[in-house]
Image (cartoon, grey):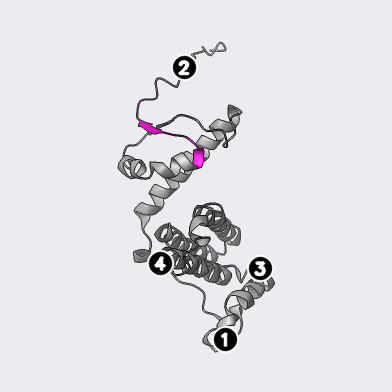
Amino acid sequence: LDRWILSQLKRTTKEVTLAMDRYENYEACGHLTAFVDALSNWYVRRSRDRFWSGETQSTDKIDAYWTLYECLITTCKLVAPFIPFLAESMWRNLAQPFGKKVAESVHLCDYPTSEDADVEEMLLAQMALLREITSLGRSARMDAKLKVRQPLSRVDVVLADETHRGWLESHAELIKTELNVKEVRFKQDATDYITYQIQPDFKR
């Protein structure tokens, strides 16, 4: 999770910078919104147990806090041109407690930069696929009027591409937790679940 969100942060930094260099501020805001959504609705939510761990000196707990702090500080700098007053308020709450070691204002900081080497593209693709699976699973439950708090015996995931199957299988526990199921089964053949109805084009 830590490596994924930091890679997501680096990629967002690059995408926002490229968009702003082209004067496409709306696109830049879209990248920022997507990152904030990933940070709050996936990283923070999936790391709650780490944040609330009773072991105050646990390496895992400290890693979670510092990763989140890095994301918030960098996001604060990224959004400064768009929401200057809110960014300044965030900066004073997050950075100024460290005193003279940081800039007096977020608007006196250098804008974040990103190198391609800092981004784990494979991990980003894998996590995006996992998030899509859980999102589709929740939608399927909603369509069937089966609330997430109601446990189910199994979910069948049909993959159009087997590239990341091994990684997904090793992280199946996360899918089980998100969808509240006891078993995750990956399949490639969707014929058991899809029916086709062919209708002629009568006008032709």
Toward the viewer: 84 or 43? Answer: 43
- Quickly name the residue at label 4: 59
Q: Report how far apart the C-alphas of labels 1 and 2 lie in the structure.
A: 66 Å
Asked if labels 1 and 3 touch by Cβ distance under 8 angstroms, the answer is: no
Which residue is under mark 3?
Answer: 83
Residue visible at 40% across and 60% down in the picture = 3
Disc 2 designates what residue? 196
Above or below: residue 123 compared with residue 146 = below
Q: Circle 2 sits in a helix, a strand or a loop, which is it?
A: loop
Q: Is residue 191 magenta?
A: no
User: From mark 3 to mark 1, how far is it between C-alphas?
Assistant: 24 Å
- Residue 33, relative to residue 68: is it above or below? above
Q: Which quadrant would the N terminus be assigned to in this image?
A: bottom left
Specify which label sits upstream in the sequence, 1 or 2. Answer: 1
Q: Is residue 186 magenta?
A: yes
Q: How many marks can you see?
A: 4
**Residue 149 place in picture, x, y as percent:** 57, 37
Identify the amino acid type marked 2.
Tyr
Q: Amino acid at mark 1?
A: Gly
Q: Earlier in the sequence, mark 2 or mark 4?
A: 4
Residue 191: which quarter of the image? top left
First-in-chain label (2 vs 3): 3
